[in-house]
Amino acid sequence: MYAAAVEDLTYTVKEAGKDRTILNHISCFFEQGKIYTISGPSGSGKTTLLYAMAGLLDQVGGRVRIGETELLRERRRSRDRIRLEKIGMVFQNLNLFDFMNVEDNILIPYYLRKQRISMKVRRQVGEYLELLNLGQIQKKQISALSGGEQQRVAIIRAIVSAPQLILCDEPTASLDSKNVYIFMEALMKLQRESKSTIVIVTHDQRVFDYGDEKIRIVDGSLYQ
């Protein structure tokens, strides 16, 4: 079963009045419950592929399927809803909110979906924090945490509602070697719990090696 698929994906931008192809007829299938790592030179299209898979780009050619849903055929508002329900994202800059505590940051997907938050979900947040060696820090402010701790909070937020697909854009770029290891081990622990499919864009060979499936992009084309 595929959690996601891209088929004949193309994306072109205008640069200095000329067309530049960022994604060049890419096709790739992402199986449920696997970790995929994507590497390649700067400007090769890695992050663009991730954003296309999340439905964040317009004027993309080809198909993006999240489960059975044809993402690119949907209107923007519908894409936003699908992304909220089926996709978790971990960005390089984390997008955590300093004015909110740890628990509220983790529960943002529930707030945006206007879902009632049960005691079971709150207990799960505590269990995930313990699993990632963070202890019971639900009420701490984000600004009180170290960079590595914030990274782990961002993982929990992406995975807490067990999305079908988790997309990570250079999530370890600002971490030292010790925290890269902690981050990836934490991500793998949560992935085993949730059975989500995870796609990681990275320049870091150590992170790349964690992939069940490893993909390289060069000049907008895939090499597996």
Image: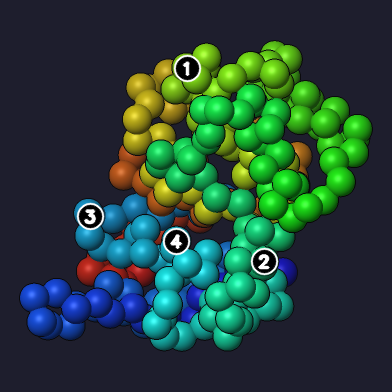
Q: Nearer the viewer, residue 181 or 116?
A: 116
Marks 1 and 2, the one that precedes in the sequence = 2
Residue at the disc numbered 2? 81
Label for residue 146? 1
Front: mark 1 or 4 = 1
> Could you tell me the amino acid type at mark 3?
Pro
Q: Are marks 2 and 3 in contact (CB under 8 Å)?
A: no
Give coordinates of residue 218: x percent, y percent. 25, 65
Looking at the image, residue 198 lies above or below residue 27: above
Q: Which residue is mark 3?
A: 41
- Going from N to C along the chain, the mark reached first, 3 or 4, is 3
For label 4, count other residues whose C-alpha is less than 10 Å away and answer few (under 14), some (14-19) or many (20+).
many
Residue at image point 73% right, 15% down? 136
**Is residue 165 depicted above or below 126 in this figure?**
below
Q: Badge 4 is on which residue?
A: 50
Location of residue 137 in the rendering, given as x and y in whole percent from the top left corner: 68, 16
